[in-house]
Amino acid sequence: MFSARPAWLRAAFAALFCAAFFCSPAVSLFAGILFALLLGNPYAALSKSLSKKMLQWCVVGLGFGMNFHASLAAGRDGMLFTIVSVVAVMLLGVVLGRLLGVGRKSAYLISAGTAICGGSAIAAVAPVIDSDENETSLSLATIFVLNAVALFLFPALGARIGMTEREFGTWAAIAIHDTSSVVGAGAAYGEEALLVATTVKLTRALWIIPLSLVSMAVFRRKGTKIRIPWFIGWFVVAMLVNTYCNLPGWFSHGVSLASRAGLSATLFLIGGGLSAEVIRRVGIRPLVLGVALWAVISLLSLGVILLP
């Protein structure tokens, strides 16, 4: 399975993956990207499947470090932003996609990934609208490239603007696509930013349900199942257990700490999935659409958040 790759390359990748547990999210992601672009990922398929599972379990683990009441208040603060931005991005994405000559389904998937929660939204909506493998992979690649940029760019911009941790957490949850990059950016900015970003993002992810129903009507497909990320429910359960079950402090702290370490390692694997082939496959038009929608949602949410 891996014979085509030198043993030293596989060993180096494994060693960096282990080291990523002890590094910051940004450093881990950068190391993964650099390794993949310069040397190639010797475990590309394994990295993809493992990173997805690790991300889900790490998000659930983060729930053991959060209070349900505080998280509920944080999610409520971002609800208005979520409603406005989801509707605006979906409508704008359809219009811009047509103007740019991007395929209807590809434009719809990129819009869904930008509006809600990146790859999870695309994976949920793709079977509903019956997109083919090329349309789905193109949309995922577009979102993936922008996610990699966001994890580095947003914390620096937030610090430059002088945003509080609560403001940054809300902004990151709305303007960054995937949960992995949202959580990574929040963790890089601070404890409160991580709490707010995670809660608002997972609240935002619930929009997968109404969007899938609307997609069925728009593309006139019946009998398809809506795929809801299971870890959202378990994340809420973990917060409830931590809030009401009087868990030992060492346990909650230990699980939360382990989850953050796992998140850094997950980001190394995610970074390792970015290759020159992925960048070439995206092409200029879908990338222009993705960047345009990303700019709109970033500036719109930033303006609302910073309004006096």
Image: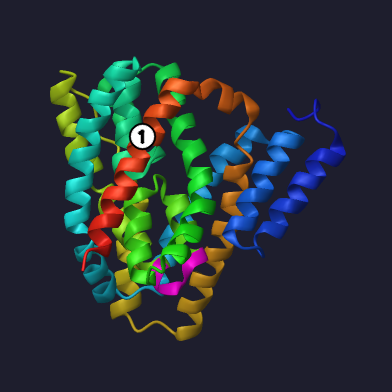
Colour approach in the figure: rainbow
Q: Looking at the image, can residue 58 be seen?
A: no
Q: Quadrant of the C terminus?
A: bottom left
**Residue 237 among magenta residues:** no
Residue 89: image x %, image y %? Answer: 25, 37
> Is residue 190 one of those drawn in magenta?
yes
The residue sitting at 39% across, 73% down in the picture is 192
Provide the secondary structure element on which disc 1 rests.
helix
Q: Residue 270 sits in which quadrant?
A: top right
Q: Nearer the viewer, residue 146 or 122?
A: 146
From the image, tell me which residue sits under label 1: 292
Q: Residue at x 61, y 45 (%)?
A: 269
Q: Residues within 10 Å of mark 1 (few under 14, many from 20)?
A: some
In the image, residue 124 above or below residue 24: above
Image point (23%, 68%), residue name: 72
Q: Is residue 43 above or below residue 54?
A: above
Q: Position of residue 181 (x, y in %)?
A: 47, 51
Q: Which x, y percent locates residue 136?
A: 41, 24
Q: Is residue 228 above or below residue 232?
A: above
Residue 180 located left or right of residue 82 = right
- The residue positioned 49% from the left and 30% from the top of the image is 141
Q: Is residue 45 left or right of residue 124?
A: right
Q: Quadrant of residue 120?
A: top left
Q: In the depicted view, which residue is nearer to us: 179 or 188?
A: 188
Considering the image in quadrants, where does the N terminus appear?
top right
Residue 290 showing in the rendered view? yes
Extent of the magenta region: 188-193
Q: Give the main secondary structure, helix, strand or loop, of the magenta stretch.
A: helix
